[in-house]
Each structure stands twice: as C-alpha cells, then as structure tokens.
Amino acid sequence: MTEVTYYTQEGLDKLKEEVHYLKTTGRQQISKAIAEARDKGDLSENAEYDAAKEAQGLHEAKISKLNATLASARLIDESKLDLSKVLALSIVKIKNVKNGATMTYQLVAETEADLKTGKISVKSPIAQGLLGKSVGDTTEIEVPAGKIEFEILEISR
C-alpha cells in the first residue's frame, strides 16, 4: 500500500500533467522508436530494438508509479492550515542559532520538493526536525554537516 502524500493544488496539477504527458506524447515517442528499430531487420540481433523495448518497460513502470502516487495523493486546503505549529505545507522562517542566518522553507511532498524555490520535502531531516514545533521553539536537527540548532521565527501558509 502506498502511503498518503499531501499536495498543494499546484503540485497535484503538475503530477497530473506529467502522467498525461507520459501516457500520450511519451508513449507515442517510444512506439515510434520501436517501429523504427523493427524496420531495421532481424530482431534477434537488433540492439536498437532491445533498447527501445527496455525504454518502453521503464516508461510504463514510471507511469504505474505516478498513477499509484496520484491515487494516494490528498489535496490540502491551505486556507485551513493551523499556523500555531509547523505542518506539511507550512512556510517556515527559521534562524540558525549559531551563525544567525535565516532561511524560509515550505514543507511539501517529496515530488514537489525544489530547493531553488525554497520547497523541501516533509521527509527531509530539516523538515522532520521542524514538524510540530511552534514559533519561538528551538530544535536541534541532525544534518549531513552535523547537528544544527534552529529557532522558529515565523509560520505562515
């Protein structure tokens, strides 16, 4: 059983778009590659055909995985988020207690995570250390570089 994953409307729409693309354009491209390889002759010694069939298998596996993710996806109504503590989809402003650097992250589903836009997975070490905490709380989080102490400055949506 796939675990339930919570999404923003934007993230859920992107997931649906990707599945649609893979089922339509992606399948057409792979079908074309198989047909081209098949036209090159003897299939028993045709490496291009074998590669195209393997690509088709991987493509179908990806579609299957995304369909399973979509089936267990739940949309969170961001207007009803509790802003008194850090939850999935919260936007959290934190301060590194040691060096004073501040960062703002939104805690999102793994498939929505994008550090460049400030979105981190709820399964990441930082997010796990922040979940359930309130403004003013400090928490020590184990990251690859060691333990870092963060203070929660602000929670929004």
Image (cartoon, helix red, strand yellow):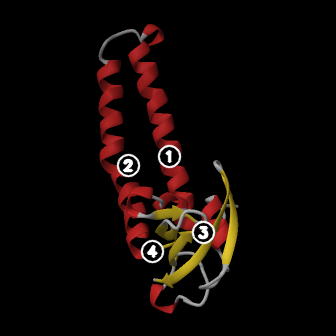
Looking at marks 1 and 2 on the same chain, the residue that comes earlier in the sequence is marked by 2
Q: Which residue type carries mark 1?
A: Lys
Frontmost residue, 95 versus 115: 95
The CA span between labels 3 and 1 is 42 Å
Q: Which residue is mark 3?
A: 97
Residue visible at 64% across and 48% down in the picture: 145
Q: Is residue 130 left or right of residue 106?
A: right
Q: Is residue 26 left or right of residue 4?
A: left
Q: Which residue is mark 1?
A: 62
Q: Nearer the viewer, mark 3 or mark 4?
A: 3
Q: Which residue type carries mark 4?
A: Thr
Tag 1 and tag 2, C-beta contact below 8 Å: yes
The CA span between labels 1 and 2 is 9 Å
- Counting other residues with Cα less than 10 Å from the Cα at mark 3, is it few (<14), some (14-19), or many (20 or more)? some
- Counting other residues with Cα less than 10 Å from the Cα at mark 4, is it few (<14), some (14-19), or many (20 or more)? some
Q: Which residue is mark 2?
A: 22
Q: Is residue 151 left or right of residue 51?
A: right
